[in-house]
Image (cartoon, rainbow, N blue to C red):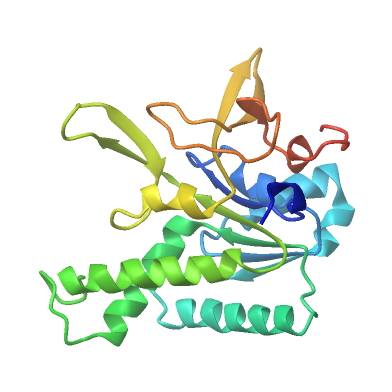
Amino acid sequence: MLLSTLKPETKHTVLIYGDSGNGKSVFASSFPGPIKVFDFDGKIASAAGYWGIHDKTRLDHIDADDLQSMNADPEQYAKFYSQLVELEKQARDGKLPWKTVVLDSLTTWCDALMREIIRQNPGIKGAAPGMPGLQTYGIFGAKFREQLSRLLALPCNVVVTAHIAIDKDEHTGEILRRPLVIGRNASYLPIIFGEVYRAFTEIKDDKVTYWAQTQATPSYIARTQIPGLAPRIPLTYSSLVPGIKKN
């Protein structure tokens, strides 16, 4: 296949990770609507509050499923999975009603997936009842990649948020900051996402500015496939798309 025959990508697959309060949920909800949100964090209210002030009409185009479970509800993951299957069916039938699907966050989604794997495999013994064993992590890695790939294959924008993990490289002693996921799956994420950004803020004269880092450094995972995108951009969807007025 000649590269000259390739058409520009009409959708974005974006992973945005960072500390809490850095604008990840609002960024995800700034993408084109209608938007479907799988809210595992229980923080979509922050986006509702933002748009309630800045653009109330957007609230009518965002549908959020509350999948947060402080009590480790065994149905939490099942609800998500059944809806993923339904989204795939709608896509096959050409009837997908969403322009953007949001998973908020990958970190808490991982927790729900691990609990489901432990529940489905009671014969695998961990260090304590309800704790994962070595085989459990193997199953998790396979499920993590398979189901996340299915989500990203949907014919719409897919935005996934994640919290941040701070680790120390055993060989170099360097401090690494990566998306917080179970096991050693963080390095897999830039392979399957078109865009990987770190969210951060700057405060000057009591004004908070929200940014996305789009290019990798030794300390942070990041990447972009959008030509000409600056190393850091305002944390809005409009910053990704040429011709749209920046917020």
Residue 70, quarter of the rendered image: bottom left
Q: Percent position (x, y) of residue 143?
A: 39, 73
Q: Percent position (x, y) of residue 196?
A: 54, 43
> For this view, does 245 lie left or right of residue 124?
right
Q: Percent position (x, y) of residue 156?
A: 72, 63
> For this view, does 84 lie left or right of residue 54?
left
Furthest-top residue in view? Answer: 205
Furthest-left residue in view? Answer: 127
Please tell me which residue lies in front, 242 or 212: 242
Please tell me which residue lies in front, 45 or 143: 143
Residue at 15% across, 77% down: 129
Q: Is residue 180 visible?
A: no
Q: Percent position (x, y) of residue 171?
A: 16, 31
Q: Quadrant of the N terminus?
A: bottom right
Q: Is residue 61 visible?
A: yes
* Residue 154, above or below 169: below
